[in-house]
Every structure is written in C-alpha cells, then in structure tokens.
Amino acid sequence: MRRRILLLLFALCTSLQWTMAQNPKWVEKAKHAVFSIVTYDKNDKILNTGNGFFVSEDGIALSDYALFKGAQRAVIINYEGKQMPVESIMGADDMYDVVKFRVGITEKKVPALSLSVVPPVVGADIYLLPYSTRSDRSCAIGKVKAADKIEGGYSYYTLDMRLADKMVSCPLATTDGQVFGMAQKSSGQDTATICYAIDVNFAMKQSISALSFSDMALNDIGIKKALPGTEEEALVFLYMASGGLSSDEYMLLLDDFIACYPNNPDGYLRRATQQLFLSKDEASMDKVAEDLDEALSVASQKDDVYFNRAKTIYSYMLDDPDPVYKDWSYDKALEEIRSAIAIKELPVYVQTEGDILFAKQDYAAAFASYDKVNKSDIASPATFFSAARAKELMQAPMDEVLAIMDSCVARCPQPYTESAAPYIFERARIRMEAGHARDAMFDYNAYFNAVNGNVNDLFYYYREQAAVAARQYQIALDDLAKAIELNPQELLYYAELAVVNIRVGRNEEAIDVLNKALEINPEYSEAYRLMGLAQVQMKRNEDACASFAKAKELGDPNVDELIKKHCK
C-alpha cells in the first residue's frame, strides 16, 4: 500500500511539473522551433533519431553530436510534420556532444529561439521545450542546481529536473524564454531528479575553419561540411579539401564557394580545373570555358586570371587531346599568358611563357624566356634546368649547356638531398656528352650519396660508362657486377662486362661472363661475336672463327668485317 501511495505521489509530482510548465506565454510559439531529427547511414538505413532546435530564422540549428556520428544524410521533421534535409555541418565537438548545422528550409524563414546573453543563476527556474506535433504537449520545469565553467568561460549546468530519453538535445530556456542550454544525456545514477545541459553559446561557437578538414569529429560525419565563415579561410579550406574528397564531393564544395563568393575568381578557376579533369565531351568542356570566362569577368587582377587560363589550356594540350576543344591550342595558351605579361611581367608568367614555347618546340624563344627568369628573384635549380634543356635542343655546343647546368646545381643547397639528385644526374649525362668523363663520375658519386644509395641497375650501368671513358676500369668492372646482381636477366650488362674484361686483357673472365649470358639466351649473337674477339686475343683463331660464324648464323650485322680480317 505504501509503495502504491509513493508511486501515486510521484505521478502527481510529474503531472504537476508538466502543468506548471504550461504557464509562460512564450512557450506556445517557442516550441515551434524544436524539431525531430532522423539520420541515415551509408546504406540509407535509419541510424539514429533525436531532437534539435533552430537558432536562426535562416535554418541554423543545434543538436547532439552522437546523433550525427556516422551519418551520411539527415532530415528534420518540424512541428507541422514537414521534412527538411540537413544541408551542411557547420561545426561539432565530440567531447561535449554538440553539433551545429544548417537545414535546407522550404520557406523564407523558420521559427527560431532567442539565445540568452545572461546565463541563469543557481536556483533560477528554467524550462525545457520538448519536440511534439501535438498542441497539448507542455514543457517541463526545473531549477539550476550548479553551473561549472568549461573551456572558453562557458558553463556546464547541473539541473534539478527529470529528463526523459526523448528530451535529449531539447532546448532549455529562462523564465523570459531565452535559451541558455541544450539538454544532455545523464551520466549519473540519479536520473529521476538530476539532468545536465551544455551552454548553448558553446554550441554556437562551433565552426568550420581552414584546418577543419583534418578534424576527426567532423570527418566522422559524412554529411557535407559548410564553408568557413571568412572568404580567406574558405579558400584555404578548398585547398585542404582538394586531395581528400571525391570528385563529386569537391565539385559540390566548389559550387558552395561560388554561391557564397560569386565575385571571387578563384572559385571559377578551381571549378574549371576540376571540371576539366572530369570532362568527357564538348558539353562539359563548354562548362570549363564558361567558368574561365566568368573568372576573367569578375576579377580585379586580370593578369592572374590570364595566367591561370593559360596554364589550364597548356595542361589540356599536354595530354594530346583528340579531338581538340574548339580553338584551344598552344597558340591560344600563349595568347593568354602574353595578355598576363602585358599587364604585369611577373617572372612566374614568363616561366609559363617559356614552357608553352617549349611545348611548341620553339626552343630558341623558350630559352629567351627562361633566361629572363634566371635573371629574376625566382631563379632556381628548376628554372636553370629548363633553360639547359632548351639550349641542348637548340643544338648548342655542349659546353654551353654544361655551363647552365653548373648554375643549376650551384643553386642546390649542400649537402645534397633527394631534391637535388635529378639535377646532379642530368649534369653527369651532359658532362659525358661534353667529354668530361671524370667530372661525370664525381656527379654520379654525388647522386649516389644524395639518394642514400637507393639506386637501381641503370645507375651502375651509367656510372660504368663514365668510368670506362675515364679509364677507371676496376670501378667499371665493379659497377657492372653490381648491375648484374640487381638485374641478372639484362644481357647488355654481360656484354658490357665482357668488353671491359677484354679491354684490360682478362679474356678468360670475358668468356666466362659470355657463357653465363648464353645460358640466359643461347641465341644471343653478340655474345658469340665478343667471345670470338676474346679468343683472337688469346691466339685461338680457329675457336674465334667458329664463334664469329655462330654470330653470323644468328644474324649479328657487325661480324662480317671480323670474319674477313681473322678468318680465311
């Protein structure tokens, strides 16, 4: 009997609590800002359901992070039972379980709650507004039991109030209807009389920044993220997101940026580049061209847009498209970059002019552009390398090409690292072409150190060639042995090793090497010809002539003169 009386009293208290909450005049209007949320997973199955509320008439809302974690899409259901999609996530904090988002509203504005500027004091009466499509659902009343400070000076409230499961993430308001907090799940045992709330202003401060792309809490929500609040941060966010989103997701982000900042040419240029990457027909290429034109139209700095237009067309032409889009060509790219240079002759523009001229195989004009760049403050190993390539293709004397490559390598910081390695390797090749074999060997050694010895068989073959030209035969023999160790199926290395052995009088060793080559390929004609040369050196003319005959039988075109000279 006593238990029944206690239960009856509890029910009456609960009923009284709901009844008391019906008193404030603002409640009826305010509760229209509260809604239900349904989130869906990647298979479009319901993931979670919960509550949220609008904090602005243009559709900004708050809820709990746990509701959205793992969600790929979400919808809200307002007090009238209408569904609206969650458009984008505007910020989140998994520790305090809050998320801010924008709803794609279907009307000009939605009912929104006013946020409290002054937090309620301990002992103050407070109201919880539940979600309901029923007109008779009233709010619950309670009191502030404690207010603890968290990061940023915000409050975390302990409330003397009973909280049902379906009330999580509902708004909490002061007696004058100002929202100060959002109800959260109780972690303690006394859930019958105690619940908790996070400061609504802490939830409101959640935002997307330029670095939010690496935020794990945000990444665990598959719904599109809003852009940061400033144009500058939004641009950085676009850059950060470019490598981590799918092509379709990134295009949507670019569309958002252009919608927010229609007078910023970067949005159109980036979308043109992305569209070019995805383009499969003339219709999609038309969109690329339209974005490039719009970028030029809105830009205040026309030279930068001309520069980017030139780069876009140049990159497109490098892929050797068939058919080519309308009037796009290297000449068109050249026209665009020269329009940029006419406005402002920046070295980076001149470098691009050189690259386009190089692609047109106008090497003399390309060199002239590169030479200008190399006299500017952006001169670098890369710019001197470009000039050296153009100079070589002009068929200039190799010593002139080498002088430019010396300037290239001189700009590489020492000790040399992997970034300098390609330039050192290229100078070694040019030194060989110019007849400076010993210097080429020094470069190959420097390259070896720059890459910490991470080289392949071709490296040892190239260094061997320099060693032979420099008459460093033991080094040549060692390098060929290493090349064979790394690539034992390459017959060229066996032939070259035999040649070096023959040159230093190691004819027996040469024959042994050639026999190994013939074990790999018994029809390797060059092995028989070289074996014949070794046998001639050993005064074994009969064996030599048999080897030459076998080489001829296998189709060696270089053996006829040897047969005439040594065989009767």
Image (spheres, grey):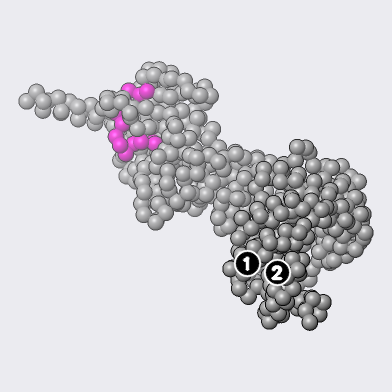
Residue 241: give x, y in percent of width and height.
60, 48
Look at label 2 and name its amino acid. Answer: Met
Q: Image height check: is 12 above or below 336?
A: above
Specify the quadrant that holds the N terminus. top left
Q: Are marks 1 and 2 in contact (CB under 8 Å)?
A: yes
- The answer to whether residue 43 is seen in the rendering is yes
Residue identifier under label 2: 531
* Distance (Cα) linking label 1 and label 2: 9 Å
Depth order, front residue of 563/39: 563
Residue identifier under label 1: 515
Look at label 1 and name its amino acid. Answer: Asn
* First in residue order: circle 1 vs circle 2: 1
Depth order, front residue of 403/468: 468
Q: Which residues are magenta?
A: 158-170
Tag 1 secondary structure:
helix
Residue at 53%, 41% in the rendered image = 90
Specify the quadrant that holds the C terminus. bottom right
Furthest residue toward top: 122
Residue 494: give x, y in percent of width and height.
67, 63
The crowding category of the residue bearing disc 2, from other C-alpha atoms within 10 Å (few below 14, some 14 to 19, many at least 20), is many
- The answer to whether residue 262 is seen in the rendering is no
